[in-house]
């Protein structure tokens, strides 16, 4: 036992960082010194006549196991995020290609999922191409959606459509341009002919996330986007008549925890995912890392007590590393913030697959999927009136983390550059779920018609105290932090040329 404590001293120190008790510093000077000593101890492990002692061999092997587990968690984070959503959804609403939960009265803070948008209608389904092979998604006119594999990479069209490849987007931002069409999902190992008459998209995983979004103009009239969504049909190719009838359970006001694990149970989930999935040749090195910690396709995952302890500490450390990455601007890309003189982060720098010409962006990907799910070109495209932009703030104008103990104000100048609508939403900084602040929704948006100033600008108040402007106030929770996402759907020229800039989140008395 003494050996285990010394071996994982660094694990315990890192895992203690970022505790949920606001206002407390989880890392002391002595803890930092201990961590530095840990590195020194590893680097200076004595080799006598070319050999380490047996206890030191065990120490180095445990450190390697711990590091492999941390990196495996970070690598698998997009899959853990979406697989947790799948398992929780299927447990609550049922499983199968024909099950499409819809949040028909919008999604409130009772649905625990990373950074949901309370100001659109959501439909979220999960299909498995290993079980059902070729699947057709019959998309009605007026739909908007995304098709992602379970590493949250957009599915790519099997062949060129209108002279180019399409990725992920269906409906309004997709090749059917909102007119409706039949999309055919191909599993990663499918080698047969591709039937004509479909937009064929290939997945790199057997599991596929079907994410539908509907927009409304009046929060009291939500029937139309729900009606459009309920016209979607999913069925095996050639078996439409015999297919199971579609079911659209209402997810609104149904408490469900769809969050990915932040402890050692993450590796149990990862083992289930690996056993359920296609073996992508591109993943062989990382699958070797997984095998080294006991996760391999077709094999039971049965770590002993010592390994379980290390895995638990590794998951907790990796979870907090993801947060540490997400809270600050990305430095490996040039556009880590939206404005040089503001604190608003660009949480989606680069392209929707987080790839560069000769490498993949690991930290931007990790930061994004720590707090979010789903990706498509429409989310990252820099085009006027297309897609959306998501400036996020974790700190106030002074660079201090946002706290529910304080009161803040943010000014949105007149003529917010959003052709469709804008919204401001509060989130929990640990889970990324909507802040459960007691209000109907932890957000305010265009349709709420907040009070404008004489110059057309809007002051939004965020804090524990109601300033007397109910429509313009988002409540926080004393003793708990939060972060903010400003969504701009259909961003216009004024956003891209930065002639329009929101204020930072400023502390007020």
Image: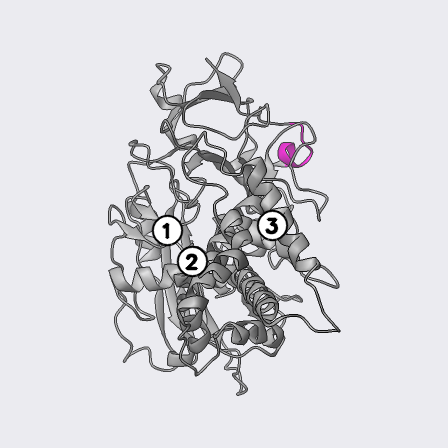
Name the residue furthest bottom.
Answer: 192
Percent x, y of residue 4: 48, 61
Looking at the rendered structure, the secondary structure element under dot 2 is strand
Pick the front one: 194 or 155: 155
Pick the front one: 2 or 135: 2
User: Residue at coordinates 44% horizontally, 43% vertically from top-left?
Assistant: 430
* 37 to 21, vertically: above or below: below
User: Is any atom of residue 170 visible in this view?
Assistant: no
* Residue assigned mark 3: 380
* 279 to 70, vertically: above or below: below
Using residue 360 as the reference point, say whether residue 172 is left or right of it.
left
From mark 1 to mark 3, how far is it between C-alphas? Answer: 20 Å
Pick the front one: 213 or 403: 403
Query: Sequence-wise, which precedes: disc 1 or disc 3?
Result: 1
What is the magenta range?
493-499
Q: How is the image coloured?
A: one colour
Using residue 268 as the reference point, say whether residue 37 is left or right of it.
right
* Residue assigned mark 1: 122
Mark 2: give few (<14), some (14-19) or many (20+) Cα within 10 Å: many
Percent x, y of residue 76: 52, 63
Q: Which numbered marker is on residue 211?
A: 2
Query: Sequence-wise, which precedes: disc 2 or disc 3?
Result: 2
Disc 1 and disc 3 in contact, CB within 8 angstroms: no
Disc 2 and disc 1 in contact, CB within 8 angstroms: yes
Locate the C terminus by quadrant. top left
Name the residue furthest front.
Answer: 48
């Amino acid at each position: 036992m003494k050996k285990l404590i010394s071996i994982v001293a660094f694990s315990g120190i890192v895992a203690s960082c970022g505790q949920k008790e606001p206002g407390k510093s989880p890392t002391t000077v002595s803890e930092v010194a201990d961590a530095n000593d840990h590195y020194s101890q590893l680097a200076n492990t004595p080799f006598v006549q070319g050999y380490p002692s047996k206890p030191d061999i065990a120490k180095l092997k445990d450190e390697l196991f711990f590091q492999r587990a941390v990196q495996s968690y970070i690598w698998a984070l997009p899959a853990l995020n979406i697989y947790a959503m799948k398992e929780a959804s299927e447990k609550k609403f049922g499983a199968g290609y024909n099950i499409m939960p819809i949040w028909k009265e919008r999604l409130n803070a009772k649905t625990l999922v990373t950074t949901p948008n309370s100001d659109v209608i959501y439909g979220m389904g999960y299909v498995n191409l290993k079980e059902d092979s070729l699947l057709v998604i019959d998309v009605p006119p007026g739909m908007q959606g995304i098709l992602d594999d379970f590493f949250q990479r957009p599915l790519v069209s099997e062949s060129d459509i209108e002279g180019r490849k399409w990725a992920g987007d269906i409906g309004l931002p997709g090749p059917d341009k909102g007119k409706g069409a039949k999309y055919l999902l191909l599993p990663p190992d499918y080698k047969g002919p591709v039937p004509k008459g479909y937009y064929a998209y290939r997945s790199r995983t057997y599991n596929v996330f079907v994410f539908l979004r509907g927009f409304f103009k009046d929060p009291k009239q939500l029937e139309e986007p729900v009606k459009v969504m309920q016209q979607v049909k999913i069925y095996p190719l050639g078996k439409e008549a015999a297919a199971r009838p579609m079911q659209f359970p209402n997810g609104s006001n149904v408490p469900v925890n769809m969050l990915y694990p932040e402890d050692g149970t993450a590796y149990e989930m990862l083992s289930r995912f690996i056993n359920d999935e296609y073996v992508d040749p591109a993943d062989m090195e990382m699958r070797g890392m997984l095998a080294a910690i006991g996760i391999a396709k077709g094999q039971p995952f049965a770590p002993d007590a010592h390994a379980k302890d290390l895995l638990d500490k590794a998951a907790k450390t990796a979870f907090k590393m993801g947060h540490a990455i997400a809270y600050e601007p990305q430095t490996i890309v040039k556009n880590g913030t939206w404005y040089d003189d503001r604190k608003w982060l660009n949480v989606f720098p680069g392209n929707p697959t987080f790839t560069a010409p000769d490498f993949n962006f690991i930290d931007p990907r990790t930061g994004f999927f720590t707090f979010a799910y789903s990706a498509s070109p429409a989310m990252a495209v820099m085009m006027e009136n297309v897609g959306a932009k998501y400036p996020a703030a974790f700190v106030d104008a002074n660079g201090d983390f946002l706290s529910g103990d304080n009161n803040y104000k943010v000014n949105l100048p007149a003529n917010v550059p959003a052709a469709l609508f804008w919204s401001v939403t509060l989130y929990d900084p640990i889970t990324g779920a909507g802040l459960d602040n007691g209000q109907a929704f932890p957000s305010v948006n265009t349709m709420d018609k907040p009070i404008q100033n004489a110059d057309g600008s809007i002051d939004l108040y965020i804090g524990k105290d109601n300033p007397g402007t109910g429509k313009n106030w988002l409540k926080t929770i004393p003793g708990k932090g939060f972060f903010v996402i400003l969504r701009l759907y259909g961003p216009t020229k004024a956003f891209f040329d930065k002639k329009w800039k929101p204020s930072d989140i400023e502390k007020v008395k």
